[in-house]
Each structure stands twice: as C-alpha cells, then as structure tokens.
Image (spheres, coloured by chain):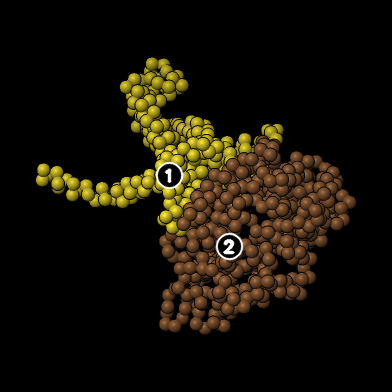
Amino acid sequence: MRRRAVAWWFVAPALCVISVFFVLPVAAALAMSVTDFDIYALADWRNLRVVGLRNYVELLQRPLFWKALGNTLYFVAVGVPLSLAASLGAALLLGSPLARLQAVFRTALFAPVVTTIVAVAVIWRYLLGTRYGFVNYALGALGIEPIDWLGDPRFAMPAIILFAVWKNFGYNMIILLAGLQNIPRELYEAARMDGASALARFRFVTLPQLGPILAIVGILTVAGYFQLFAEPYVMTQGGPLQSTVSVLYFMYEEGFKWWNLGNASAVAFLLFLLIFAVTLVQMRFARRGEAWR
Amino acid sequence: MQRASDVTVVRFWAMGREGEVVSALIPDFEREHPGIRVDVQQLPWTAAHQKLLTAFAGDSTPDVCQLGNTWVPEFVALGALEPLDAPIARAALDAGDFFAGIWDTNVIGGRVYGVPWYVDTRLLFYRTDLFAQAGVTRAPASWAEWTRALAAVKAHAGAGRYAMLLPSNEFEPLLALALQQDEPLLRDAARHGNFASAGFRRALAFYVALFRDGYAPIATAAEIANVWSEFGRGTFASFVSGPWNIGELDRRLPAALQSTWSTAPLPGPRGPGASIAGGSSLVLFRASRGKDAAWKLVEWLSRPEIELRFHRMTGDLPPRRSAWRDAALAADARARAFRDQLERVKPAPKVPEWERIADELRVIAERTARGDMSVDAAARELDARAERILEKRRWLLARGARD
C-alpha cells in the first residue's frame, strides 16, 4: 500500500500537467458544446442556455458542415495516398545505392516541411496564378488552356492537395528512409540469388519489411490530413464557392469569426469522433496485416 | 490607465494604415494637453476583431479605440462601450455637421456610442475614355441608364473584355443595391430576415443580370492578379469600390492614363441611389478609468482641421461637412462624387448578427451569380439562414419583454 502511495507521488507531476493542460480544457470544451455560448453569453452569463445536443443535431442539418466534411474527405482520400506515394518514392530514390549527393537531396526535400506555411503559400499563389503563373505557363507549353487554380471551384481543392503534399511529404520520407536503411541487406542478396527482379524485390522484401512503419506513417498522416486548416486559410480562405472549407476551417469560423464557441466545440468533438473511428479501423487493418505476416 | 506622477496615459488602439499614421498627429495633441500622454497601439485589421473580443473577455480593453462602424452593434451588445451622449452635449459637438447616414451607424437604441472618424462608401469607378468610345459621355444615374451604358461598353469592348468587375467574393456591391430599396433587410426589429421582399429580390435580380448578360465576369478578387493594372489595360471598364482606390489608382496607373478615369455616385433604381454607410468610429470603453482624458482625444481628433490633416496623410475621407469646405478637397473632382454620395448613405442593419448574415449573403449571391439557384430560391434560402442566425436574438427580445 505504501509503495503504491509513493508511486502516486512520482506520477503526480505528470498527472498535474496532463489534467491542467489536457483533461480540463477537453472537459470545458465538452461542457461548452452543450451550451449556446456566444457573444451574448460573453456579455452576461444569464444569456447562456444549456441546449443539450441541439448544437450537434443542428450541425448535422447544416449543408455547410456536410460540405466541409465532404471537402475534408476528398482531401484525405486523394491527399494521403499521394503523399505516401511521394514520400515512399523519394525515400526509395534517396535510399538507392546509386543516389549521389544524398545529404543535399535529403535536406532539399525536407526543406518544405520546416519552412513557414504562410511564406511558401505566397510563392505558391504566384506559381498558381491564372494569367502569369508558372504552372499555367508550363501547362501552356503542353497545349493545355490556362486553369484558374484558386478561383475555380473544381480546381481549388486539387491545388490545395498539391500544395499540402509538396509541403508535407518530406517528413514521412525521412521516417521511411530510416525504415529502408534498417532492412537487412542479406534479404536483398538472397532475393537476388533467387532471381527476383527489382519489382519483385520491392514487392516481396521492401514492402513487407516496411509494413509496420508504413502503417504508423499512414495512421499519423490520415489523422494529420483530417485536420486540414492552414492551407485553405492562407491560400483561399475557404473559397471559391466554399470548395476548400474543411471541417477545421469551418470550426475556426464558427468559433473565432462568429464567436459561437458552443457550436465550434461541437464541431471539434464530431471531428475527434471521426478521426478516432478512422484510426480504429486503420489499427485493425494494421494488426490483421501483422498477423498475416 | 496608469498614473505616473500627474500624467494620465490614454491607451488608444487603432487599426491598419490609420494606426500607423495617427502616431504622427499625437505630439500636437499632447502639446495642447500637457497632462495627457497617448499610448498608440496598432492592430492589423485581420486580427483586430478577435483581439478586441479577447481583450473584453480578459478585462483589458483600451481607453479609446478605432472601431469599424459595422462592429459597433456587437460591442454595444457586449456592454463594452460607453454611451457618449453626455460628453457630446458638454463639448457641443455638432452632430448635424456629420453626414447623417454615417452618424446613424453609431446610434443604437437611441444612444450614441461612437464619433465617426473617417467615412467609407462604395460607388462607381469608371474609364471615361472607354465609356466615351462606346458613346456614353455622362455617368449613368439610374439603373436603366446604367444597364444601357454597360451594354454599349460591352458591345464596344469585344470578347475577353468586360464593362465591369464585381468580384464574387465581395458582398458590398449587392448590399449597396439592396440598401437602395425601400424595404429594410431585416424585419420586426431585426427578428427575421426580409429577403423575400420585392425590394431585395429586385436588387438581387439586377445584380445577377450583370453577370448573366455578360457585363461582368464571374471572378473572385484573387483571380484578377492586379485589379488596378487590369483596369488600366481596359480588361474591365468600371468597378464598384471605396475611397482608398482613388489613392491606389493615382499611384499605380501611368500618367498617360490619369485623365481617363473618374468616379460617379452609385446609380439607383430611379436616379441617384443610396450606398453603404461605412468607415470607422472612435469609441470609449466602459471599463476605461480615464474617460475624461480619453474623450479629449476623441474630441481633438474630430476637429475639422485635424480630420483634414488626417485626410492628407491617409486619403481617408472626413465625416464632417465642414471639413469638406477645404479648397483642395472641394476641388478634387474624384472626391466630389463621394461628397455627393455621402449625403445618400444608409447603415446596414445594426445588429451583432448582421456580419454573419452578410457572409451568407456573399455565399448565396455568388451561387446565384453562377446560376446554381434562382433569385427566388436565393431569397428563400437567405431568409431561412437569417432565421437560424437570429434565433438567439428573438429569445433575448422575448425574455426582455417578459422581465
């Protein structure tokens, strides 16, 4: 019993920090999500109403919420595979024994991850400009008509996806590169002795060996991509025609533009539930993959 | 409010360009008022609203603040602002000297909460040469004349060029057209939207037709990389905007083009129409502990001669008619259209929820302009959204009536 008390004392500092900076805010947000906290309530507490689940019910009836959810799912469904493919491709190229100047390329490809998003967004807006942008200039050389990247509702999300993938793929690339370097050389040698082609070596040696790392990277990337915010915030402010409003952007506008903190908290919890559910499914798949191996 | 020996410090928050420039005026104020020191803090416009609300929640509001006049109702609802009727009466500040529509934006529930600092409204900027080439020698005054002029200019301009630019991410031009109607935008003491009224539907139909008939392209402001150089190039021959564009066009267009553009009051359904009463006011915060000193600053900044100095530094237009008697300002042909328009400005509905409804207006107007919905469907949808946004207001009013 005494030892148990001592143990509690040891974990107490960590528990204090967690409860002040995590449990308390989350509980407050949960409480707020069942009220209609707004500027009237900020002025006078008597203007606060406890509305139960009304925020949630009304959210599920708002077309813009569904639109934001659809936009976010589009971003995740296209962005995550693209991002993983780019990371894996870059990692394979960098990990190849033929690669020269590895350190230089590794730094260059990682650079977008550590640059400020606001600064690179300005440059990307120039690149994507309709009349004088480089992207349309290059497409023009291929005979493709200029595309209004950030102004056309059909192309704004693809532009955001391109930008986000470019900005983020370096991070996963570093992790996958470390994973690749951990694969024992002997496996490749053995495969080569058995006459496996480069493609077969990738399929039957690299991928299974990278499996657990790919699963982790996939889970983290999905969770990260669901929280799409900064890219539309700096590039399009959610437009045109709300085609780049993500769930988090919607929450930001509800909370900090319109000061409907009750609604905004409800959005946060819905997004949490969604990410939680998707992650559970992914974990199950990852575990099944593990067992199968 | 800190008291260092016998000097009173007034904390003054100002936004954007005004915040940068106003510091240069302050030494003169401090010379006239030796007991007062002004501490100017500049806020970027994009962060100002959030910062002010946070300051209110944290009980650290400034003494004086520049407030966009569409924000006044919200801060009055918060109970954050000090009514100014008494100091205005004591100082014998002549409310009648201010443009009536602008002054009105600061009056809520019969009390005055701000003194207009500079004014802003939207009217027509147009290329006189392109209009003349199309046979339009006089700026249009009514909607019918406007449509005829745009049709002529568009026919003369040919493919790829337009008679006008209305960025689809701006709600202001449509709001101005809607304010020209007799019916209010919200009805029953702003309990419900009034978008299904004949007036609003007329304004929206006129607005949508500008796109449908090909006078204006459907484009956001971000798509037109440089509005001023495209205007100079003649990509579009007119646009609806505010006074800051006088300075921008002066600076950005080459000398050869300077004689080719002008401004005109906004055409209305039957002759010159109303436009939006915009701009910023100076307000005192209720929590301030140095209201006398703070009011002295507001009073000083509102003197016509100080307003004129401020105008020369920023290009912002003064809100007092007496300031407009200045020879240089009176002789400025492009400012004159604003002088004329300012006699016909109307405030947007003065409720805290309005900015949010205006945002819905922008979204629905863009969808209607793109042909996604009809004018009647848009009016119904706007009423439905306003109904939801105003729910809390209705509850508060009902409870207030019970108590």
- Residue B25 lies in quadrant: bottom right
Residue at the outermost right position: B135
Is residue A215 placed above or below B8 in the rendered structure? above
Classify residue A180 as left or right of residue B237. left
Determine whether the residue tagged by mark 2 lies in a helix, strand or loop: strand
Instruction: Examine the rendering and report whether any part of residue B20 can be seen.
Output: no
**Mark 2 closeness class: few <14, some 14–19, many ≥20 residues within 10 Å:** some
Residue at the outermost left position: A2
Q: Which residue is mark 1?
A: A51
Residue B317 placement (x, y as % from top left): 68, 66
Amino acid type shown at disc 1:
Val
Q: Name the foreground residue: B186 vs B365.
A: B186
Residue drawn at 43 percent across, 51 percent down: A48
Classify residue A214 as left or right of residue B109. left
Q: Name the foreground residue: B104 vs B213.
A: B104
Q: Which chain is yellow?
A: A
Q: Which residue is mark 2?
A: B108
Residue drawn at 60 percent across, 57 percent down: B350
Instruction: Examine the rendering and report whether any part of residue A66 can be seen.
Output: yes
Is residue A143 placed above or below B402 in the rendered structure? above
Q: CA distance from mark 2 to mark 1?
A: 30 Å
Determine whether the residue tagged by mark 1 lies in a helix, strand or loop: loop
Residue B98 placement (x, y as % from top left): 67, 69
Residue at the outermost top position: A194
Classify residue B361 as left or right of residue B7. right
Residue A189 placement (x, y as % from top left): 37, 22
Q: Quadrant of the N terminus of chain A?
A: top left
Q: Name the foreground residue: B288 vs B376.
A: B376
Q: Which chain is brown?
A: B
**Mark 1 closeness class: few <14, some 14–19, many ≥20 residues within 10 Å:** some
Residue B45 placement (x, y as % from top left): 56, 59
